[in-house]
Amino acid sequence: MQDSVTVRMAAPAEQIWELVSDITNTGKFSPETIEAEWLGGATGPAVGVKFRGHVNRNGWGLKYWTVCRIVAADPGREFAFTVLGPGGRQVNTWRYRFAPVEGGTEVTESFEMHPMLPVRLYWLIAGRARGRTNRNGMRETLERIKAAVE
C-alpha cells in the first residue's frame, strides 16, 4: 500500500522544494489535484498547517475536496502531508524528498496508505489499478515539475 517514483532535475533542491511546498501550485503539476488552498489563515508550509485539495479522481469526473495536514516541511530536504478522512484519521501520506546530486536534485514522490480496515479493503479490490494510476500520476507530476524548474 505504498510506492514511489524518482526523477532527476537540473535545479537546486531548495528551488524545487519552494515550488512543491507551495500547495497553491499543486494544480499546475498534479494530474488529479485540480487546485489547493490554505486553511486556517495559513499562507505557507509548516508542520501542522492544513490545506484543502480539490481532486478529480482518476480524471473521470468524480470530484471532491480533501483536507490535508502537513507532517514534514524541511526546506530543500522533505515536504509531506497526510490526507485526513472522517474524524481526522490519516488515510494516505504523500511525501517529496529532495536529494542533491551532481548537476541537480533527485526528487522522490511517494505515497503510503495508512493501515485501517476501509483502506485495506479498498486496496484489496482496486489496489492494482490504483497503484498503477498513482505511479503514473507521480511520474507525470514530477515530469511537470522538472519542466518548470529546468
Image (cartoon, rainbow, N blue to C red):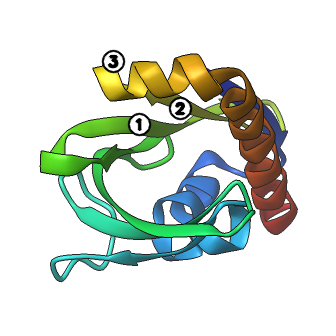
> Is residue 81 toward the left or the right of residue 20 in the image?
left
The residue pinned by badge 3 equals 115
Q: Residue at x 74, y 30 (%)?
A: 129
SS for dot 3 = loop
Where residue 83 sits: x, y (%)?
A: 35, 48
- Mark 2 or mark 3, whichever is nearer to me: 3
Q: Are marks 2 and 3 in contact (CB under 8 Å)?
A: no
Q: Are marks 1 and 3 in contact (CB under 8 Å)?
A: no
Identify the amino acid type marked 1: Thr
The residue pinned by badge 2 equals 111
Name which of mark 1 and mark 3 comes first in the sequence. 1
Name which of mark 1 and mark 2 comes first in the sequence. 1
Q: Which quarter of the rendered picture does the C terminus lie within?
A: bottom right
Q: Quadrant of residue 40?
A: bottom left
Q: CA distance from mark 2 to mark 3?
A: 13 Å
The residue pinned by badge 1 equals 93
Q: Can residue 45 be seen at all in this image of the molecule?
A: yes
> Is residue 91 toward the left or the right of residue 14 in the image?
left
Identify the amino acid type marked 3: Pro
Q: Residue at x 74, y 62 (%)?
A: 59
